[in-house]
Image (cartoon, rainbow, N blue to C red):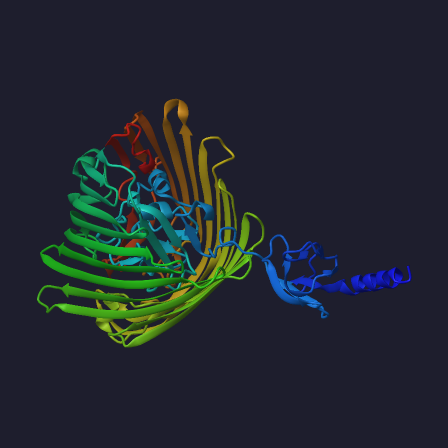
Amino acid sequence: MKVIYPLLFLFFSYAVQAQHTVHGKVVDASGQPILGANIFLTGTYDGTSTAADGRFTFTSEHEGDYILSISFIGFNTRLIPITLPYKSSIESVLHEAFSRLDGVTVNAGTFEASDEKKGTILRSLDIATTAGATADIAGALNTLPGTQKVGETGRLFVRGGEGHETRTFVDGLWVQNPYNSTTDNLPSRNRFSPFLFKGTLFSTGGYSAEYSQALSSTLVLNTIDFPTATQTDISLMTVGGSIAHTLTGEKQAVTAELGYTNLKPYFSMVKQNQAWGKAPQALNASLVYRHKIRKSGLLKVYATLNDATLGIIQKDAATLTTPVPIGLDNRYAYLNISYRDIISKKWQVYAGASYNYSKDNLAISQANLIKKDHGLHIKNTWTYDWSERVVLRFGAESFKSKAIYRQPHTNDQKLDEVILGAFSEADIYLTSKITARAGVRLDHAARMGKAAPAPRVSLAYKTGAQSQISLAYGQFAQQPQPAWQLYQPKLQFELATHYILNYQWSTNDRTFRGEMYHKAYDQLITFQGDVTSGISNIDNAGNGYARGLDLFWRDRKSIKNVDYWISYSYLDTKRQYLHFPEKAVPSFASKHNVSVVYKHFVPSIKTQIGSTFSFTSARTYHDPNQERFNAQHTKPFFDLSINAAYLFRQHIIVYASATNILGFDNVFNYQYAQQKNSEGIYNREPVRQGAPRFIFMGIFITLAKDKTKNQLDNL
């Protein structure tokens, strides 16, 4: 026993000494303690959890090198190598675990229509079935907040910006002439069918550093990657017809389309406000080719040709009395080639080139004016997944444009310009609730001899499971219109600075957006005189501002089989530019814009019906008989349009639509004579709609192996 007691004493003494204490504290990135974090030595059962103050203590009899694991739900696990016995206190910081799928998306100023998870705003189906839009991309986008309805042009005017301040890109490549050619005060349409595209990204401001030469807005159209089936689509319409055939294979697909429009039969039945010498008609052909390369590469080739003519009789611009015949012939060609690929786990590459050709032959009485446009855009971008939290994008591009103007008894005027641009941008996922985008681009115009740096920054904070707040700041530059560069080759870039605050709440079926913005314009073009009598002193001395509020609500859930949206825009803007003698509200800007779009599918009669109500407050115009500049106002604009699509057979759809069914006599502006009459007054003519209303009917037939296929998604 005398021996046993000393042995037991030595054993228990050793056991007590072998119980090594491990202690420390666990906090988050902001220094706040984390309650309930799991602490343990890997490969053992030794461990504990943190208390309310983030502290922990446990003992272990193990010695040597071990890994201490510290983990908590929603945070990245931290592994710390330690050697037992370990006498120092362990201070550990856990960072939030991040998933890009659950993170926020920077979307200030942007309507995304290609990703359902980000709150789809407009799809091809939306564009086609919006009453009053007549399947025109710009027409449908004009029902969104931030746009002003300028009916005499049919183009996109965004947040106090002119139509040319919105640039169009197809698969990332510039489209120099995105609208059909027309004469003055005659609205045009976007050249592209909405059914060509899988998604539409319409940015009303604060857009990515990837895009340039747009002061106010960008419209980014992404073509369908790969069609799902071989089929033939036939369209028979009151204004013409078309036939398209799609042939698909395992790695290749091709779509060819031929279309013809002629409004002469329609004009003979429906009275028009204008006098037509030759009703508009056009022949167009397009080809889309896709080729899958490797596992992830996709080559796209899109080509389109268009031949259009029209003849209209308008009053002489100088006196507004003598009828003057005006004819317009347009030849147009566009080619777009792009390739995208994922070349490794971290690298993606994009390369593309587009070519644009347009020739307008404008005949006024016996005089012919010819304008030719050539545009070439080459672009290469790279995307690098630096880490789970940082994505880098950078690239370079070249814009080459050439304009040729030919007038009677004068030599050709030529304008060549090459703009070289480069950009770099990073998406930084700071936490699962905070995302930042920071970038900069630099453009240099060779002919002007000027460079324009443009930093851009956006920040988004996730306020809830379906809501977020976004901020955006950016500088944007655009070369002056070619007509002004003919007078003065050494002009500078026109500039705009955007400030945007955005709130968005979105589920699969409902979306609410509210956005405040301020734009500051600088270096706008100014001159004295006018184009008819001659201009002088052209310079970049202009400036201005645009500020306002946009609201948008879309609901596809509250009413069964109903999809509707409501948009409202408030705009406060003034400019000192062009021939303006003082800072004033431009004539294209309206203070209040409201659109209500309603679509209802009635299963019992296999019909979708829709309506669109539009309101635009009075626009300013200048009356030369009055002293004050741009102080007069038009009447407000009203429009109520309807449409319906009936599924006559599974593969046959009958479609009808009518614009302005109540026959509002909308006046967009006034045109004044350049000379006074015998009473010393400048005569005027109102600029009205082409007709009180436009009525359209069509039959759409789909031929495919799958007998359930139809064009309902296109109507």
Q: Is residue 526 left or right of residue 243?
A: right
Residue 355 coordinates in the image, percent (x, y): 21, 59
Q: Tell me the quarter of the image containing the N terminus.
A: bottom right
Residue 359 coordinates in the image, percent (x, y): 15, 57
Q: Which of the 4 image quadrants contains residue 584? A: bottom left
Q: Is residue 614 left or right of residue 5?
A: left
> Is residue 583 at all visible to an observer of this figure?
no
1 in relation to 224, above or below = below
Which residue is situated farthest in the right direction here?
Answer: 2
Q: Residue at x 23, y 51 (%)?
A: 302
Q: Tell me the quarter of the image containing the C terminus.
A: top left
Q: Nearer the viewer, residue 702 or 392?
A: 392
Residue 443 coordinates in the image, percent (x, y): 33, 71
Q: Is residue 66 left or right of residue 165?
A: right
Residue 404 coordinates in the image, percent (x, y): 16, 65
Q: Residue at x 23, y 66 (%)?
A: 400
Number of numbered discs on residues: 0
Q: Is residue 485 left or right of residue 600?
A: left
62 in relation to 144, above or below = below
> Is residue 44 at all visible to an observer of this figure?
yes
654 in relation to 624, above or below = above
Q: Nearer the viewer, residue 6 or 523?
A: 6
Q: Residue at x 54, y 62 (%)?
A: 430
Q: Which of the 4 image quadrants contains residue 692? A: top left
